[in-house]
Amino acid sequence: MIIAIDGPAASGKGTIGKRLAAHYRLRHLDTGLLYRAVGKTVLDAGKKPDDRIAAIAAAQALDLSRFNEAVLKSAEVGEAASYVSAIPEVRAALVDFQRNFAVTPPGAVLDGRDIGTVICPDADVKIFVTASPETRAARRAAEYRAGGKTIDDATVLADIRKRDERDSSRSAAPLKQAADAVLLDTTTMGVEDAVKAAIAIVESKRLR
Ligand code: DC
């Protein structure tokens, strides 16, 4: 089974993806890590994240075998990722890895922005996870605070709005709900309710 989960930053798609993978004993890929790894490579080389040549070279040479999540989850790397991910050649360099990951038995849960629309258009289940920008900003700010970072909610909200705009308005594989995806709005849900709702969506598709 292949489950495609898409949605904006901090919508809860990563947590839901991990939990669905454990529940159905599938492998899990947080595809945002791929773009974050490209963004980080560009930053580490002292280049700007909108440097096309540097970003394409980084994507084509990326070691896809392991990722240091803790390092890649910073706000700075997320911002860089949202620039490099708008470059078509960067996306193209990462397609085969994602598709191979998805079809390797017993299947997988992939979360990102274009899984249901571009990477796995034939996924068995597609879920588009969303939440209001304010809720997503509050969640992100709480994560940063838990990690010992002081950052105010208004700054995080402004960043989230900027990221939404950039991810949705780019011409290469913009963030968009697939026509056959089920919408899951987690604005008023805690993690457990959101996971339960996601499992219910998978079950409703499996019974068809
Ligand atoms: O989900 P995330 O915050 O880790 O994603 C980081 C950036 O990568 C985000 O701004 C958009 C981009 N991204 C993408 O374009 N396509 C994906 N499948 C996953 C992430």
Image (tube, rainbow, N blue to C red):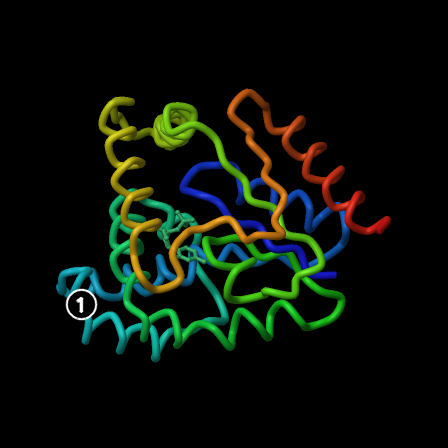
Image mark count: 1
Q: Is residue 138 left or right of residue 86?
A: right
The N terminus: image quadrant: bottom right
| x then y, percent, for residue 93 | 39, 76
Taking the spot 79% from the left edge, 43% from the top edge, the residue there is 204
Residue 92 at x, y = what percent?
39, 75
Q: Toward the viewer: 29 or 203?
A: 203
As shown in the figure, which amino acid type bears the numbered disc 1?
Ala
Binning the other alpha carbons within 10 Å of mark 1 as few (below 14), some (14 to 19) or many (20 upward) gives few
User: Who's the residue at 57% across and 50% down the image?
Assistant: 5
Q: Which residue lies furthest to the front in this view?
A: 179
Q: Position of residue 78 (x, y in %)?
A: 31, 49
Which quadrant holds residue 48?
bottom left
| Residue found at x 24% / y 31% | 158
Q: In this view, does 10 lie to the left or right of 52?
A: right
Secondary element under disc 1, as helix, strand or loop, is: loop
Percent position of residue 136, x then y: 41, 30
- Between residues 167 and 146, which one lies in front from this camera angle? 167
Q: Name the residue under label 1.
A: 45
Q: Is residue 193 above or below residue 124?
A: above
**Above or below — where is 144 with respect to 42?**
above
Q: In which quarter of the image is residue 108?
A: bottom right
